[in-house]
Image: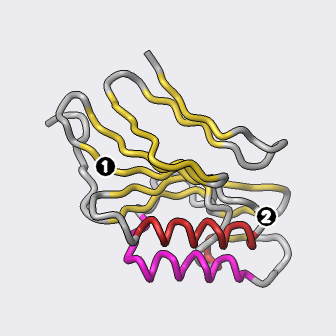
Amino acid sequence: MAQSCRIKANSFAAGIWILWNATVLVDILAIHLQMVHMKVCSEINSSSFLCTVVYASPQQTKRKDLWYNLDVMENSISESWLIVGDFNSVLHDSERVGGVVQERLGCKWFQSFLFDNKIWDLGYNSPQFTWSRRNLSQRLDRQFRVGLLCAKLYGP
């Protein structure tokens, strides 16, 4: 039996929908317009970790609020934590090709959040750019690890 948590989209922006099945127990710990924070536990081997699913606002001033809220959460977390989603921000110029050159203050806030909290980007095995429109391509979707994330959630 599948279960879910949903933050409704506002037109075509925002919105998060998380689904899980009966082999996983999910305890929703916090809901914010740009994220859902939860504890994920395996019924198979009793391992657990924290997970935050993000759909960051396309508006950089609203994203600053997201970085602040994640930073406050990070200061109270002492276990493994996975942060995944669409961050609507690039970390480096190499993660953006095409489009109009613009000030990237949002990128600086994102970099500071990761650096200050010693958060590791888990990289990717897919195409470098996760979003494209006309002549602009960017890497906006990613996953991060904080602490020692349990690598084998589902057994040996």
| Dominant secondary structure, magenta | helix
Q: Quadrant of the N terminus?
A: top left
Q: Is residue 152 above or below residue 139?
A: above
Q: Could you tell me the amino acid type at mark 1? A: Phe
Q: Secondary structure at mark 2?
A: strand
Q: Is residue 128 above or below residue 13?
A: below
Q: Where residue 80 sits in the image (x, y, percent)? A: 29, 58
Q: Which residue is tagged 2?
A: 136
94 or 57, nearer to the observer: 57
Q: Quadrant of residue 89?
A: bottom right
Q: Which residue is tagged 1?
A: 49
N-terminal label among 2 and 1: 1
In this rendering, position of residue 42 left or right of residue 33: left
Q: At 61% from the left edge and 76% from the top edge, which residue is drawn?
A: 94
Q: Secondary structure at mark 1?
A: strand
Q: Within 10 angstroms of label 1, few (less than 14), some, or many (20 or more) residues?
A: some
In this rendering, position of residue 78 left or right of residue 99: left
Q: Could you tell me the amino acid type at mark 2? A: Leu
Q: Where residue 66 sits in the image (x, y, percent)? A: 61, 65
Magenta segment, which residues? Answer: 104-121
Q: At 36% from the left edge and 21% from the top edge, which residue is drawn?
A: 22
